Image (cartoon, rainbow, N blue to C red):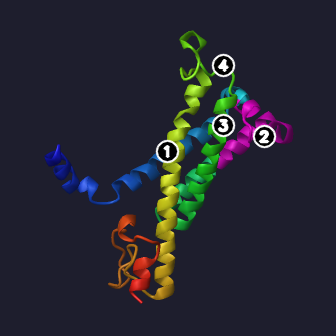
Amino acid sequence: MDKLTKFLSKAAPFQGDLDYHLIRVSMVIIYFFFGYQKWFDYEMQGLVPFFTHGPLIFWMYSVFGMKGSTYLLGVSEWLFGALILAGFWNKKLGALGALGSVMTFITTITIIPFMPDGWAQSAGGFPAMVGNVAFLMKDVVLLAVSFYLLKHDVVRASVATDSVLSGGSAVCGISSNHGRSDRVQPIEDYGVIGERVRSRR
């Protein structure tokens, strides 16, 4: 096992930020398809139990109506996906999209305790999930993924900002070699945000 771990640690995919980029791409793809669904009647009908039993969104039907609520959800999903995509070039925009994503999945996860018929009585009820509850469980992972992106984008944006303010351009992937951009260093290399920046002053 030690040899396998050592071998993998030296493999190219584990040397850079491939995981960080893959997660970003995955969230962009997910939000594209989620948002696309919201413009069709089949999805509008399917979302009724989620809206009516969601403690944070139950009020939306009375304010926006069924169609308006569904369209608003679709627009927000496309917006968050677009901001997360923009995070490839602008970490502040990426962080904004990730924050919206975190709020989205907190909203959907809170529906789980209130969703009727979510536990299979034939299997003794909780924790034998079924139906809409089983569908919502994926959002626990998506919440963690969104928080991962939020943390990384916030740290990178903060370090880059501190670098500009201090004049240390060799931090967070900004090279002093004629402004050439290099690979972003892992977050773990920085410790407290901006510590390396301050040490360069």
Q: CA distance from mark 4 to mark 3?
A: 24 Å
Reading the chain from its start, which is encountered first: label 1 or label 4?
1
Comparing 45 with 160, the one in front is: 160
Q: Is residue 54 magenta?
A: yes
Q: Which residues are magenta?
A: 50-76
Residue 68 badge: 2
User: Which three-letter amino acid code belongs to the residue tagged 2?
Assistant: Gly
Comparing 82 with 156, the one in front is: 156
SS label for mark 4: loop
Closer to us: mark 2 or mark 4?
Answer: 4
The reply to whether discs 4 and 3 touch (Cβ–Cβ < 8 Å) is no
Q: Residue at x 27, y 53 (%)?
A: 13
Q: In the rendered view, does 60 fall on the left or right side of 112?
A: right
Q: CA distance from mark 1 to mark 3?
A: 15 Å
Residue projecting furthest to the right: 62
Reading the chain from its start, which is encountered first: label 2 or label 1?
1
What residue did someone put label 3 on? Answer: 38
Q: Residue at x 22, y 54 (%)?
A: 9
What residue did someone put label 1 on? Answer: 29
Residue projecting furthest to the top: 122
- Image location (x, y in percent) of residue 177: 32, 84
Q: Can residue 90 be seen in the rendering of this structure?
A: no
